[in-house]
Image (cartoon, rainbow, N blue to C red):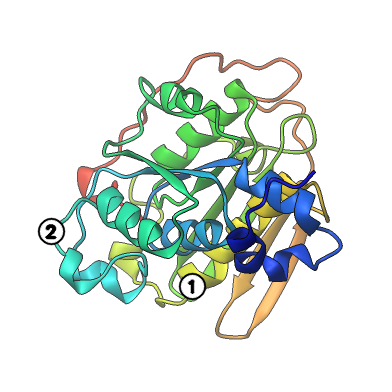
């Protein structure tokens, strides 16, 4: 028997008429929990589309405040939000969009000491990595592998973007593709190199799509594939990537059994 209210049936009607979703699928979405780490260029559109879809619980993690330079791409924030903690701005936007959604905010930087507690706090079903620095990306990957949680990795810079999905036991993790962190300053951040504002929307909504597909159990996820996008040539490439049996965290004989914090200049520890 459906637990959807008449208002929910109307709100999610375009989902419900999809044979891959239906009423039961929408109930799955409403009962799901997704953690979005970083409410910047990637996390902003991802969180907004997840909220619109009716994901019942969304966690927002960010330690930054809204800056005027964010508004070119971080669409969950408005001009009036400048100076406000990003998680609070994000929470207010989601609350105005969909009252069905419960939002948990974590106004802090993810570290080796708190990320597992944050993941466990609501027993999140899926994670979105919306960060733009290597220390955070390696930390999120390692935490998800150790906690056996699926997540969507993504990054954007200039006119390029990429994304992949990790599901425990079903494919490679981020470290299988990128075994070690690059040397400091070897790869510029968006702050240093720039980024076309809409890149966050293109890639962030793909991350939200992967989260919804995982929740619903439909389609083919980007497990075992790295999807790249070049806006200048309007080219998508889907690159098959194998699981690395020698991976330090998910391989046959893992050497990483505890989380550690990697060093990076404070000015780079920001979201896209």
Is residue 220 depicted above or below 45 in this figure?
Answer: above
Disc 2 secondary structure class = loop
Compared across the picture, whether 156 is left or right of 210 comes to left
Residue at horizontal 49 percent and vertical 28 percent from the top: 122
Residue 216 seen by the camera: yes
Residue positioned most to the left: 83
Residue 83, labelled with which disc? 2
Q: Give percent across and percent down for residue 101.
A: 48, 49
Q: Give percent across and percent down for residue 145.
A: 62, 27
Disc 1 secondary structure class = helix
Compared across the picture, whether 133 is left or right of 107 comes to right
For disc 1, the marked residue is: 199
Nearest to the eye among marks 1 and 2: give it: 2
Residue at horizontal 33 percent and vertical 56 percent from the top: 90
Q: Give percent across and percent down for residue 78.
A: 25, 70
Compared across the picture, whether 81 is left or right of 178 comes to left
């Amino acid at each position: 028997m459906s637990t959807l209210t008449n208002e929910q049936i109307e709100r999610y009607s375009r989902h419900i008429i999809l044979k891959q979703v239906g009423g039961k699928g929408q109930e799955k979405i409403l009962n799901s929990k997704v953690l979005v780490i970083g409410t910047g260029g990637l996390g902003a559109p991802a969180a907004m589309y997840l909220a619109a879809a009716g994901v019942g619980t969304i966690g927002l993690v960010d330690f930054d405040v809204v800056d005027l330079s964010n508004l070119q791409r971080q669409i969950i924030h408005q001009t009036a939000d400048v100076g406000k903690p990003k998680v609070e701005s994000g929470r207010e936007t989601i609350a105005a969009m969909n009252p069905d959604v419960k939002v948990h905010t974590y106004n802090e930087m993810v570290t080796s000491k708190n990320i597992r507690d944050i993941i466990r706090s609501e027993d999140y079903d899926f994670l979105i990595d919306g960060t733009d620095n290597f220390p955070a990306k390696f930390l999120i990957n390692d935490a998800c592998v150790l906690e056996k949680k699926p997540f969507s990795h993504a990054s954007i810079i200039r006119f390029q973007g990429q994304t992949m999905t990790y599901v425990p036991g079903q494919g490679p993790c981020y470290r299988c593709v990128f075994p070690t962190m690059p040397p400091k300053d070897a790869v510029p951040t968006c702050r240093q190199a720039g980024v076309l504002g809409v890149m966050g929307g293109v890639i962030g909504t793909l991350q939200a799509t992967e989260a919804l597909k995982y929740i619903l159990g439909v389609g083919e996820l980007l497990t075992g594939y790295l999807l790249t996008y070049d806006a200048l040539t309007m080219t998508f490439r889907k690159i098959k990537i194998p699981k690395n049996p020698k991976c330090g965290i998910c391989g046959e004989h893992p050497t990483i059994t505890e989380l550690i914090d990697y060093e990076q200049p404070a000015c780079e520890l920001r979201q896209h």
